[in-house]
Amino acid sequence: MKIIAGIDIGGTKCAITFAQVEEKGTFRFLDKVKEQTIRDDPQKAIGRFVEIIGDKCRENPQWKLAAIGISCGGPLDSRKGLILAPPNLPLWDQVDIYTPLREAFGVPVAMENDANACALAEWYQGAGVGTENMVFLTFGTGMGAGLILGGKLYSGTNDMAGEVGHIRLADEGPLGYGKNGSFEGFCSGGGIANQGREEAVEAMRRGKKVGFCRDMEDLPNVTAERVAQALQEGDPYAEKIFAQVARRLGQGLSILIDILNPQMIVIGSIYARQETVLRDTMLKIIRQEALCQSAKVCKICPPALGERIGDYAAITVGLMQLPRET
């Protein structure tokens, strides 16, 4: 039984998923282990990955481990297998994750940043099946893109392709990716929280109540989830924030459509949960801003792989290391 292990490394939790490779290169999930991320000791964390994979293989002697795939927030060097101090794991700097896994199991090991890994998953077994040119946008805590161009993952010269969150959409605006008015500043969980705090301060100074913030002391607790909940309850300040998110999302997508001419843009996380709120305004801006010839051939949709996309992503990175006939 040919098995792939997928390691999804997050700032808070890690998941190690095991899947059986089936006919035509598809796979079926078998097992999963979730643990808190060991943020302050990457070598200890990697040791746990080795231990978990080894234990599962010993418990299941019919398994034949064929490859290991890793999904992790960037920056990283996928060629050398180095994790380069991602914002959510600042102590994981110049961490070689390939060597210990290869030495322990003697199988191919590959790693992609989370946006690239999700792009591969949606292209291979999700919404993007059959496309040649596809973009996957994370739209979670941050905003990043995975690019499938000409039927291949495009990573750029040093794995930095797809950092669309750094694009400046306005001279002034919320901070994201170290830049005010950036795509990530407007369209990400962190960006929505920042906009929420700004709206709350302005409203409370005028003596108004805000649905997602009780008082000035509550400002640090404002999150994108809180703003979204207030939106569902009809809070006008939350509606104002999401209206701006929708406009800026349309603006950012228009740039990608004009430059890359994709067949599909798949947008995860917040868009998947708030599509009905964001879609109409987003499309209106795209009609105004993007080249009509490019816009009309580009489908925009949420992920088909749902809440398990992180598991699919890590497994797919491993799957790409096997001969395609499998």
Image: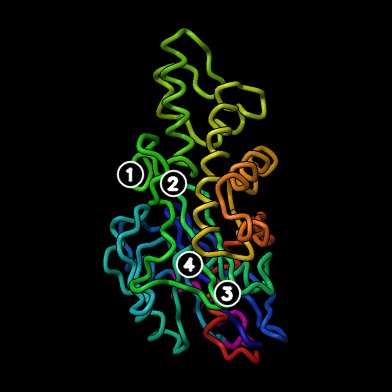
Q: Is residue 110 above or below residue 184?
A: below
Describe the element under mark 3 as helix, strand or loop.
Answer: helix
Give how far across and how far down residue 238 sits, in percent.
57, 27
Tag 1 and tag 2, C-beta contact below 8 Å: yes
Residue type indicated by callout 3: Thr
Residue 221 relative to residue 172: left or right: right
Q: Which residue is mark 1?
A: 179
**Would you identify the image quadrant in which residue 277 lies?**
top right
Give how far across and how far down residue 237 sits, in percent.
55, 23
Which of discs 3 and 1 lies nearer the camera? The answer is 1
Residue 51 lies in magenta, yes or no? yes
Q: CA distance from mark 3 to mark 1?
A: 32 Å
Q: Nearer the viewer, residue 27 or 5?
A: 27
Q: CA distance from mark 4 to mark 2?
A: 20 Å
Residue type indicated by callout 4: Ser
Give how far across and how far down residue 96 sits, in percent.
31, 74
